[in-house]
Amino acid sequence: MRKRIVKKVVVYGLVLCFVLALGFIACVRHAIVTGLDEYIAMAQAAHPHPDDSIAALIDFVDSDEHGIKDRNHAVWAMGQLRDDRALSVLEKLYTGDECDHDKALCQYELAKAIDMCKNNTPDILFVTNR
């Protein structure tokens, strides 16, 4: 009888952990997709490219008309999209210097975006269908 109760507790515990993990993954995916949509909309508003999000983001990041913080967000979005068309502008802006977020784009974020675009890192959350 006691083994049966322990078995039920373990099974229910595992099911609960699985449900919580799925909930966490869904929340992370929602946050990424929401941010991606926001930054794409920002880039499209400034540099319209109908049906081509990456082109709008490339123009946005490559323009000095926009603030560094917004351009850093666009760099992040380009990394999330994993499109190798972004490589030319990302590599042009990457210096490898120390980050100075007040004066230049984040070199760490540029390096991550370059890596994601070059290596076509798998998108396990399926957020790149944009």
Image: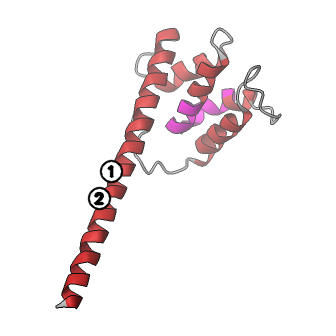
Q: SS of the residue at dot 2?
A: helix
Q: Position of residue 8 (x, y in %)?
A: 21, 78
- Residue in view at x 65 percent, y 33 percent: 87
Task: Report the quarter where the C terminus lies.
Answer: top left
Q: Where does label 1 land, which residue? A: 23
Q: Position of residue 34 (x, y in %)?
A: 40, 30
In the depicted structure, whether residue 2 falls above or below residue 42 = below
In the depicted structure, whether residue 20 falls above or below residue 37 = below
Q: Position of residue 89 (x, y in %)?
A: 67, 26
Q: Where does label 2 land, which residue? A: 19
Horizontal placement of 11 versus 1: left or right? Answer: right
**Would residue 52 be visible to someone looking at this image?**
no
Q: Position of residue 2 (x, y in %)?
A: 21, 89
**Magenta stretch holds residue 87:** yes
In the depicted structure, whether residue 61 falls above or below residue 115 = above
For disc 2, the neighbor class at 10 Å (few under 14, some 14 to 19, many from 20) is: few
- Residue in view at x 50 percent, y 36 percent: 81
Quarter location, residue 60: top right
For disc 1, the neighbor class at 10 Å (few under 14, some 14 to 19, many from 20) is: few
